[in-house]
Image (cartoon, rainbow, N blue to C red):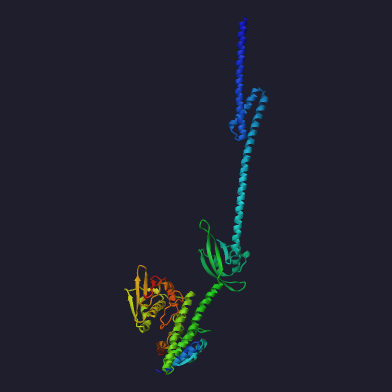
Amino acid sequence: MDNKNIKVLVVDDEADFRRLMTFWLDSKGYSVIVASDGKSAIQLVKEKNPHVVFMDLKMPVMNGIETIKRIRRFDKEIPIIIISAHVGDPEGKEAIPYRISGVFYKGKDFEEGLPLLESALRTHKKLKK
Amino acid sequence: MSSIAIIYIVTAIVSIAIALLLFNLTKLSTRARIVADDERKKQEYLSSGILSNESMRHAISEEINEIVDSQPSRQEAIKKISDVFSRELEKKINLNAQELSKKYETIIKGEKQNEEIAWKKYKRVLSDKEKTEAVIRSIAEGLVVVDAQGKVIMMNPAAERLLGVSKKDKVGKALLENLKEEQLISLVKGAEDKEEREIELISQRDETKKVLRASSAVIENENGQTIGMVSVLSDITKQKELDQLKNSFVANVSHELRTPLVAIDKSLSLILNKTTGEISPTQEEFLSIAQRNLKRLNLLINDLLDLSKLEAGKMEFKLQLSSIEKIIDECIEGLNTWIKTKSLVLEKKIQGTLPEVNVDSNRIIQVLNNLIGNAIKFTPNNGNITVEANFESKKGEIEICVQDTGAGIPKENLPKIFDKFFQASERTPTDISGTGIGLSIAKEIVELHGGRIWAESEKGQGAKFVFTLPLKSG
């Protein structure tokens, strides 16, 4: 499996975090596209068709939940992993009805996010078949 | 006739005359006595005011006697006797009148006194009423009294202000007339005692939103029937705003503090993992120092955020039936490396099976981490730590102890150790020093679960920290 064909969309309003996550995903061989807000995220999903989305919940103007809601209107299949700042964040629960593939906690090591990413991709590939 | 015979006849006549005279004299004296008696009685009844029928009869009969004695003609007799009667009657009436008059005066005096007393009491009540009204007028809280039909009986100026109405529009009318705010219906609806409700008002006058707390109580008469309701209204708008600020502050601060830490930690990880490329040993060493201290900072910030959440009353627990043994195991596992570094022996003692408890397991782990962490901190190398858990069926709680063989705590410090920022003076220099808030947070968490926490120790004898968790959630 050539990861370079797999497009990962990272949506987060913090530039530093975007940079770090991109670097890490890149080091694992994935193709990364980024969005800094909900509006451009929705645009990129429509245009670039990523295989998986990492969605930060706390964003100004349009927060993560709202963005997921809107994406789900036109794309019910795309796997979305939410990024939560802290374990026990209540916002994470609100996302559940919109079908998410998991929660990635910023506080944890990037490496712990790997299995999450891989299982999300597997569901996508399954659906594709 | 001989002269002797004449003497005998004369003597006889004289004797008879004398006898008659004597008899009359006695009669006179008796009558005089009777008259005197009567006079006395008359005087008596005149002066004593007691109109006994006896004395009156005496007086009348005496006077009639006199009239009869004087042998009056029929007409004279009738007139004189009538006079006697009318005189006596008048006397009696006068005496009665006098007595009644006296009694009347006494009564009037009594009445006047009562009236004065009543007046004085009335004035006092009036003054009390004025004082009460002054209080009601000036209190900052609004006071609204409605009758059983919901019509306003009384409204103080503060209530007028809070509700944005004027009293003259409201008194006698139902509270709801001319009032568009529907939430006010809750003020009169239902007759629940001492109910506290929050009412949101959008004032028509200045278009500001107000939140009022209405504390209502039912007014009952002595038969227990509801005759009305009194509501105390307080303006809690500022309080609510402050509460909301607190909420958003805690959430914001939390986020703002953690975000930079995450970025720093991740940057360091990527370098230390060699994802960015090779690094020299010195670079590795110093970057490790940076990361280690970052973790310290993280713990400190978490502690501070927990503390501020507790202070703001914003800490929420997710209660779930959990196994204490599992919680203990998870905790020990997390601290294993540290324990091994100090070559400490940690022993776990659990008696039998423990029932599950309704707790927020993450928070209880936090408590245990603190207690066992402290044990590790203050026990010198090669020491012992024991973690015990028992089910106290009589008390319906689980008791958990952490015992160490460290320096112990001096008796005078025991009551203070759970205070915020209190730190024992002796600290092992190589260990990570604490913030002094760990134990106070542990105490809050345990107590909010309905449990108790305490320490038993003596200087040089090690320390034992115990906390309980009730089976029924607190």
Residue A26, image x, y percentages? 44, 93
Percent position of residue A13, x then y: 50, 87
| Residue found 40% across the figure and 81% down from its top | B428
Query: The C terminus of chain A appears in which quarter of the rendering?
Result: bottom left
Q: Can you say whether B267 is above or below B196 in the image?
A: below
Q: Give percent across and percent down for residue A40.
A: 51, 89
Quarter of the image where one finds residue B229: bottom right
Q: Residue at x 52, y 67 (%)?
A: B196
Residue B76: x and y, percent? 68, 25
Q: Is residue B229 above or below residue A120?
A: above
Q: Note whether B270 is above or below B456 in the view shown.
A: below
Q: Residue furthest top?
A: B2
Q: Is residue A37 left or right of residue B338?
A: right
User: B379 and B212: which one is in front?
Assistant: B379
Q: How many marks?
A: 0
Q: Is residue A126 left or right of residue B126?
A: left
Q: Quadrant of residue B460?
A: bottom left
Q: Is residue B15 visible?
A: yes
Q: Quadrant of the N terminus of chain A?
A: bottom left
The residue lying toward the viewer, choosing from A80 and A114, is A114
| Residue at 52% in and 62% down | B218
Does B183 appear above or below B370? above
Q: Is residue A68 visible?
A: no
Q: Nearer the viewer, residue A22 or B427?
A: B427
